[in-house]
Image: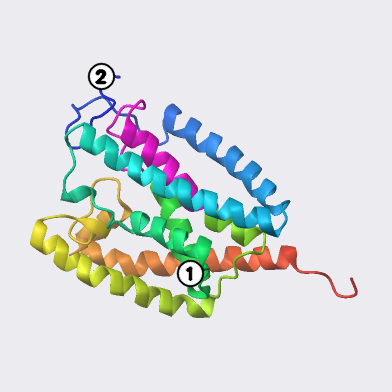
Amino acid sequence: MTYFWETVDTIAPGLGWPHFGPFHLAVLAVFLLLGAVLCRGYCGMDTDKRRRWRRTVALLLVADELFKDFGLLYGGNFSLDYLPLHLCSINIFLIALHAWRRPKLLDTFLYFVCLPAACAALLFPTWAPLPPLNFMVIHSFTVHFLLALYPLALTLCGDMDPQPRAFPRCFALLAAMAVPIWFFNRAFGTNFMFLMRADEGNPLKLFERFGSHLLGYPVLLAAVFAVMYLLLRALRRRTAVPAGK
């Protein structure tokens, strides 16, 4: 428990774990199995139980965020850098909104933006410098698992209807978020949504050789849209009812 309340800003070097090392792969394997079980369970529920499931996941996400804040305050490490202004933190509140009100645009946003962003965070975690038994490791893994689970389960079971043609509006929503956050970053020296720099391990880092990591955003968004669109088409073909049935 010596390093339980440390953060990536305070931890000593050499106490973390490598990407796709034994610990990382074990966590991913557990999440894959647990996600499959939970998605299957959700699909077998009736309408009322599904609604309660969605709201329970939303509340767990908010509680997970509060757990992070408690850990930061308890360890004396809370700063502006930990405000809920990263995309995944914003997605927590979008899922909470969706769980109660379910605006249609969020079907598309959560599928095309939240789901791949959460999966990318699980595959390329920025919290790897921390030891496994650490509150930020626990929070970061569980919160991103829930962020991926919610849109995945709802899409697989037909309770979300992502519309590719609505993706430009999702892009506009992202831009609307990014503009004030960029000014906040400039004013306070933060790096929310990785608008100011790309850290090591971040795929955006590859684009610095072309002048700026920001050039990677349109490329990655286009690639993500293409992959998620193909997956959505495959899912809809699989679940389509054959003619004459």
Q: Which residue has dot 1 on it? A: 106
Tell which of 3 and 62 is nearer to you. 62
> Going by the picture, which residue comes out furthest to the top?
2
Dot placed on the residue nearer the N-terminal end, 2 or 1: 2
- Amino acid under disc 2: Thr
Residue shown at 37%/41% (left/top)? 140
Would residue 150 appear left or right of 202 to someone viewing this image?
right
Tell which of 127 and 173 is nearer to you. 173
Residue shown at 48%/63% (left/top)? 110
Horizontal and vertical percent position of residue 17: 34, 29
Residue shown at 59%/66% (left/top)? 160
Task: Bin the neighbour count of mark 2 within 10 Å (Cα to Cα): few under 14, some 14-19, many 20 and up.
Answer: few
Helix, strand or loop at disc 1? helix
Task: Bin the neighbour count of mark 1 within 10 Å (Cα to Cα): few under 14, some 14-19, many 20 and up.
Answer: many
Horizontal and vertical percent position of residue 25: 48, 33
Mark yes or no: residue 189 visible: yes
The C terminus sits in image quarter: bottom right
Label placed on residue 205:
none
Q: Please tell me whether residue 212 belongs to the stretch shown in magenta.
A: no
Q: Which residue has dot 2 on it? A: 2
Residue span colored magenta:
125-149
Mark yes or no: residue 124 visible: no
Tell me how many marks there are. Answer: 2
Helix, strand or loop at disc 2? loop
The N terminus sits in image quarter: top left
- Amino acid under disc 1: Leu
Q: Name the quadrant containing residue 30.
A: top right
Residue shown at 19%/42% (left/top)? 78
Horizontal and vertical percent position of residue 74: 22, 32
> What secondary structure is the magenta-colored segment mainly?
helix
